[in-house]
Image: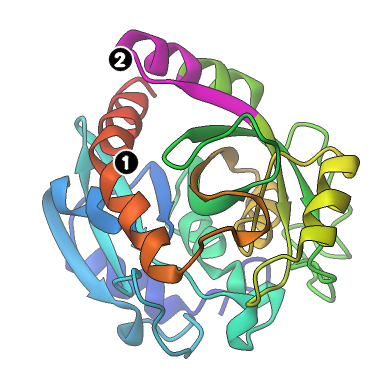
């Protein structure tokens, strides 16, 4: 097990044995968004249960629970169909495992997606939001106690956690496809309960645009390992969970899946 990555060598070998492709880009697919993996060319699926380092947690509805190695737009990719969440009882370090595995396999870019609630009134269900920054309100950090890639504790700058050049490319792709793509700040809370009206009001005052329960651990770990990051949230409900159910989260994902698939596929083809 490499100290700098904390990734079992068996997992690296398992992925490399499954496919001759050498992925350059990793994509983490959030609730209801895993359909993108079905469009991968030469896709080979590896269940998370077959990876020693992936946290052993129960599945969340809308998360297929497997890693797909394939190609999008002729670019070799890793597609994580679902993730482990801290609300399932795993540590922030373990929740960030996809970023560490991606780095171990030589990926240069991490694309993170998630289902999120709208904090500001200008966002509607089905909107896509390009993440410009985040607030880590989960109470934990995936780098706590981790020696990091250079040894010692990794004090990682987070000023440009979401790569400005990659964001510009994503915005250009969206414009060309006629896709409405807002930019906003993602607030990450621990969950699994949805936010109260008072909490949503607090987040709005803090400057958040959307809120969710994932993504931030992966992004922090990715930056610690030198991966460039771009992230998108799919708005699946109004602020304070008005009319919210997990089924509705999945339904919103289904409606936006084709649009998101085209957006991410073209974005990756430009890298």
Please identify the quadrant where the N terminus is shown. Answer: bottom right
Q: Secondary structure at mark 1?
A: helix
Q: Tell me the quarter of the picture where residue 140 sits.
A: bottom right
Q: Residues within 10 Å of mark 1 (few under 14, many from 20)?
A: many
Most foreground residue, 86 or 239: 239
Residue 33 visible to an observer of this rendering: no
Residue drawn at the location 77% of the way across and 59% of the way down: 197
| Residue 261 x %, y % | 27, 38
User: Circles 2 and 1: CB distance less than 8 Å?
Assistant: no
Decide if residue 40 is on the left or right side of residue 82: left
Task: Kindly indicate the quadrant of the structure image that contains residue 158.
Answer: top right
Asked whether residue 63 is in view, the answer is yes
In the image, 147: left or right of 237?
right
Q: In the rendered structure, does residue 182 fall within the stretch colored magenta?
A: yes
Taking the view exactly as shown, the residue that stands out farthest to the front is 243
Question: How much space separates mark 2 and mark 1, taking CA atoms?
Answer: 14 Å
**What residue is disc 1 on?**
256
In this rendering, is residue 77 above or below 124?
below
Magenta stretch, residue numbers = 170-183
| Percent coordinates x, y for residue 31 in the rendering | 41, 62
Question: Looking at the picture, how far across and down is residue 105, in whole percent?
Answer: 42, 57
Quadrant into which the C terminus falls:
top left
- What residue would you read off at disc 2? 177
Residue 83 image offset from top left, x and y in percent: 47, 69
Q: Nearer the viewer, mark 2 or mark 1?
A: 1
């Amino acid at each position: 097990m490499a100290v700098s990555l904390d990734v079992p060598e068996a997992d690296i070998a398992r992925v490399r044995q499954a496919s001759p492709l050498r992925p350059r880009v990793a994509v983490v697919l959030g609730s209801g968004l895993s359909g993108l993996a079905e469009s991968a060319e030469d896709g080979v699926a590896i269940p998370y249960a077959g990876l020693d380092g992936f946290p052993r947690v129960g599945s969340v509805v809308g998360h297929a629970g497997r890693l797909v190695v394939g190609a999008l737009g002729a670019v070799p990719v890793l597609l994580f169909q679902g993730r482990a969440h801290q609300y399932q009882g795993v540590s922030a370090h373990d929740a960030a495992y996809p970023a560490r595995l991606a780095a171990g396999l030589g990926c240069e870019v991490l694309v993170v997606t998630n289902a999120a609630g709208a904090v500001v009134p200008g966002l509607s269900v089905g909107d896509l939001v390009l993440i410009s920054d985040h607030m880590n309100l989960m109470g934990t950090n995936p780098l706590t106690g981790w020696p990091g890639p250079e040894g010692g504790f990794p004090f990682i700058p987070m000023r440009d956690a979401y790569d400005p050049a990659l964001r510009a490319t994503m915005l250009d792709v969206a414009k060309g496809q006629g896709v409405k793509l807002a930019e906003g700040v993602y607030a990450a809370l621990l969950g699994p309960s949805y936010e109260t009206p008072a909490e949503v009001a607090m987040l709005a005052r803090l400057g958040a645009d959307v809120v969710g329960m994932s993504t931030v651990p992966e992004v922090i770990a990715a930056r610690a390992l030198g991966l460039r990051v771009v992230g998108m949230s799919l708005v699946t409900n109004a602020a304070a969970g008005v009319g919210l159910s997990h089924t509705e989260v999945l339904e919103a994902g289904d409606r936006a899946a084709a649009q998101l698939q085209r957006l991410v596929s073209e974005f990756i083809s430009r890298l």
